[in-house]
Image (cartoon, rainbow, N blue to C red):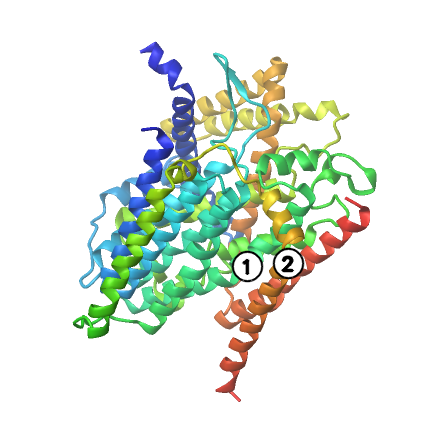
Amino acid sequence: MSDFLAQHAEILITLVKILVLLFVVLTVNAYLTWFERKLIAHIQSRWGPHRVGPHGLLQPLADGAKFLLKEDPTPAGVDKFVYYLAPLLALALALTSIAVIPFGPDPLHFKGHDIYLGIVDLNIGILALFAITALGVYGLALAGWSSNNKYSLFGGLRSSAQMISYELALTMSVVGVLLMAGKFSLRDIIDAQASSHGLFGWSGIFHWNIFAGPFPQILGFLCFFIAAIAETNRAPFDLPEAEQELVGGFHTEYASFKFAMFFIAEYTSMITVSCLCSILFFGGWLSPFPASWTFTTYLPSVLLIPFGLWVIWDGLHYETIFGRLVLPAVGAVIAVVGAVFIAVPAVNEFIQGPFWLLSKIFIFLFVYVWMRGTLPRFRYDQLMSFGWKLLLPASLANVVITAAALLWRGN
Amino acid sequence: MNAPLIIFFVLAAMCVTGAISLILQRHPIHSALSLIVVMVALAGLYLLMGAEFVAAVQIIVYGGAIMVLFIFVIMLLNAGVEERTNLSKLAGFAGIPLGVALMGFLAAAVARSQDMVQVATQTGATAPTKALANLLFQDFVYPFELTSFLILVAILGAIVLAQRENA
């Protein structure tokens, strides 16, 4: 048994990493729905979910149970094979794409193995990601086509047209970053930012691609983020599932867990895009502060301990027994974790990278929801002319200017 | 049997099955799906040969962009199930023997070079993207630019043809 473990250690470690990441991503997905509903509710002066559990925190569990227990009818006249394939395809591709994301700079040491945070580090990382997302459109398009429903078909058609239009701008907007890094691997792109020329020679945040280099990638970032929102079919680009015109769009005829699979796919792509934005343009796991400001390494603890104490305090005010028991327990765990970070310098050092990356990812997820709560949906012709006449030329201009600036600086 | 060889045969089988299914399927969407399987399996084969960049581009361009366009057009035209006709006489008399002959030639060529499978499953010797870029943009820059120009002309032609009906 131990021989077997020793021989196949790499494979086993990778399998465990996949399981852990899958668990984390699915849990985050579930709570992202809670976060989105709560945030949009507050944007619209409502309370949002607050009946199931304290602050509605158990709502995702209730939703999950509902998805599993609902009747799952298959409409008449559907193309069975494609109809069942489509949600599987959407979910599998969305989950695969997260495998190339690195989550931290330093490896964990475990019995002589270096365990990096992230499943694989490919030489062609960003290209592999684009390849997977390029296939992701089939889930939506085929779902719309196979459902034997006119609204679904329109949703599928819109999604494929939208994907074709915005994929060009998406890919082009990254070229500037790739030119500056000279590598395709996401880890190398972050490392290149760590050693880049900061804007005016300043350090910290000014090393990030969005500010640094011969030509700051602000234009590239805007193009990338807008195109990425369109690629993930989120508001204001959610035409494939425009409720007012298309009922539910491509997923009109899907119920129960097949519907949930589309939902999980959409939220997972949101997470992937947020990871990519942070890594490509916002320095990944690099801290926004100069390295000489060592006191900023205590920031995670400074955030976690008061938050944990607040959760305890909030839980004690709760009226149900469950809330009074569980919330203080959770708060205590958070506060203790924060205290451990202060107490053990090695742990504090290790979590700096993941802390900053996760914070940036969280900010982008917030922006995603914020935009959905704020912006009205595009009209179809506006969507097309925006993508082809503004976004694509802008991202091409970004490539040309960045290349010229790099050449001029003699890189 | 080592792992790359097994992966090679799995991918090769996927390719051939996909290609046969592409011809035999009666619904255009199913045919297009089979073609996607062929494209993705081909990308896997490139990856096995260490051509990472070509593999990624194969999926992005062929698997993604071009096949999405195919599926988009099939959906837009709402193409139904094809009717099956009997083989035309020409296909029967000329096509089948020619197909068999082509397969024979290819098989002979493969059989003659014994290290074909070894080459196909060679891992480690990766063709880095940098080397490819040097080839494209330094050694063969003029043919490359000419090809780009050709594609540009084709795009312009498509726009002219599309605009003609509006004018």
Residue at which label 2 appears? A395
Badge 1 marks a residue whose secondary structure is: helix
- Where residue A104 appears, x then y in whole percent? 57, 29
Which image quarter is the C terminus of chain A in? Answer: top right
- Where residue B11 appears, x then y in whole percent? 34, 43
Residue at which label 1 appears? A168
Q: In which quarter of the image is residue A306?
A: top right
Badge 2 marks a residue whose secondary structure is: helix
Mark 2: give few (<14), some (14-19) or many (20+) Cα within 10 Å: many
**Residue A157 falls left or right of residue A356:** left
- Where residue B141 appears, x then y in whole percent? 65, 57
- At horizontal 51% and vertical 49% (from top left) the residue drawn is A42
**Disc 2 vs disc 1: Cβ atoms closer than 8 Å?**
yes
Subunit under mark 1: A
Amino acid marked by disc 2: Ser
Q: In this view, does A204 lie above or below A46?
A: above
Q: Observer-nearest residue: B138 or A14?
A: B138
**Residue A266 falls left or right of residue A371:** left
Subunit under mark 2: A
Whole-Å distance between the Cαs marked 2 and 1?
9 Å
- Where residue A97 appears, x then y in whole percent? 45, 42
Amino acid marked by disc 1: Leu
Q: Can residue A159 be seen in this view?
A: no
| Residue extending furthest toward the top | A2
Mark 1: give few (<14), some (14-19) or many (20+) Cα within 10 Å: some
